[in-house]
Amino acid sequence: MRLPTLPRMALVLLLAGLAGAALWAAQARRAPAVAERLRCELPAPPQGSPHPDMVWVPAGRYVQGDDIYREEQPRRPVEVAGFWMDRTEVTNAQFAAFVHATGYVTTAERAVDAAAHPELPPELRQPGAVVFVAPDKVDGTTDVRQWWRFIPGANWRHPAGPATSIEGREAFPVVAITLADAEAYARWRGRSLPTEAEWEWAARSASPSRPPPQQEHAQPEQANTWQGPFPVKNSAADGFLGLAPAGCYAPNALGLFDLIGNVWELTVDLYRPGHFEASSPPPDQLPAALQRGQTAVRVIKGGSFLCAPDYCMRYRAGARQPQEEDLATSHLGFRTVLRTAPP
Ligand SMILES: [Ca+2]
């Protein structure tokens, strides 16, 4: 099981913006007899909540991490204070409201800063994002360029390239965002991004007791993941070939939707290839070497619609993956937290 990271230089430039539309069309053709749903009904939030679109996650102690992949180890005890968390991933509609109010322009809509990425050829400095393009066949799974393409013009408004749009997909999670974009949205709402420890605690439904390993490591039924051999055949037995609207699966015991699957979710933690002692520096404190505008790598959690048992079984609370913080991709989104008084 290898780590399907997306180093920027490993990507192939796909100049045809139409490829994105072709991708969506191809997905529609290949889809089994499952009609794509454009929204799922979320239950009404509890009456009288001070933050109706959020869920209170109580304080607690638990053992963070897992033992499937090396980067999840060793397991270690952590303690988190209580916090509010968005009950769904931030949607296109929510992000659009932010952009409408502020005029914010996302990272993927701007040319790449040559000073931050002097190694990139000019064609990879164009505005754009990295998009999953399902191949018909692959030669092994070592080379991620077989299914990841940098598509100029792809961004949150045009997730698979200029010919695609989010029209009608307002309830889907926003994608092609970077850490700066997610933090800008969170600030606008007076909120923050979660730490890895907060996120994992929420995904464990604020319970320190773990399910039996067989259950904890099983591909979840109530999540949008990948069924079949990745990346060539997806039976979409869970109802969705690509992204799903927010809230299509049963929430966890706290009432949080889609923490596992659908899109990976950003945390503020700087990525290290394993869990270290509690004496480590604060999770979002940049080392001195990274404080001059260079690209940092953050922890992302939860897995995505691309997680399959034979390739990336990271549809687990304890799983984690690195992500360049300024690289926009089609399988990454986020949700926010609010560290304030309990209900
Ligand atoms: Ca799926």
Image (cartoon, rainbow, N blue to C red):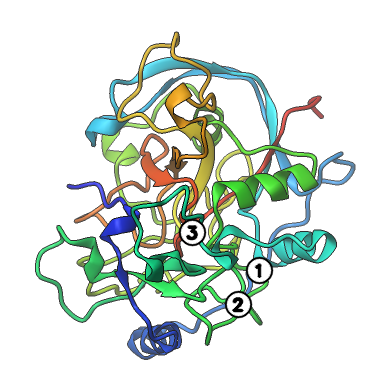
Query: Where residue 256 sits: x, y (%)?
Result: 61, 45
- Residue shown at 40% from the left, 62% from the top: 305
Q: Mark number for residue 171? A: 1
Q: Residue furthest right?
A: 48
Query: Where residue 128 sits: x, y (%)?
Result: 49, 69
Q: CA distance from mark 2 to mark 1?
A: 7 Å
Of residues 6 and 305, which is closer to you in this image?
Answer: 6
Q: In this figure, which residue is indicated by the disc labeled 2?
A: 38
Whichever of labels 3 and 1 marks the residue nearer the N terminus, that label is 1
Q: Quadrant of residue 103?
A: bottom right
Label 1 Cα crowd, 10 Å radius (few <14 / some 14-19 / many 20+) = many
* Callout 3–callout 1 Cβ contact below 8 Å: no
Q: Disc 1 on helix, strand or loop? A: loop
- Residue 131 in view here: no
- Residue shown at 23% from the left, 62% from the top: 144
Label 2 Cα crowd, 10 Å radius (few <14 / some 14-19 / many 20+) = few
Q: Mark number for residue 328? A: 3
Q: Mark number for residue 224? A: none
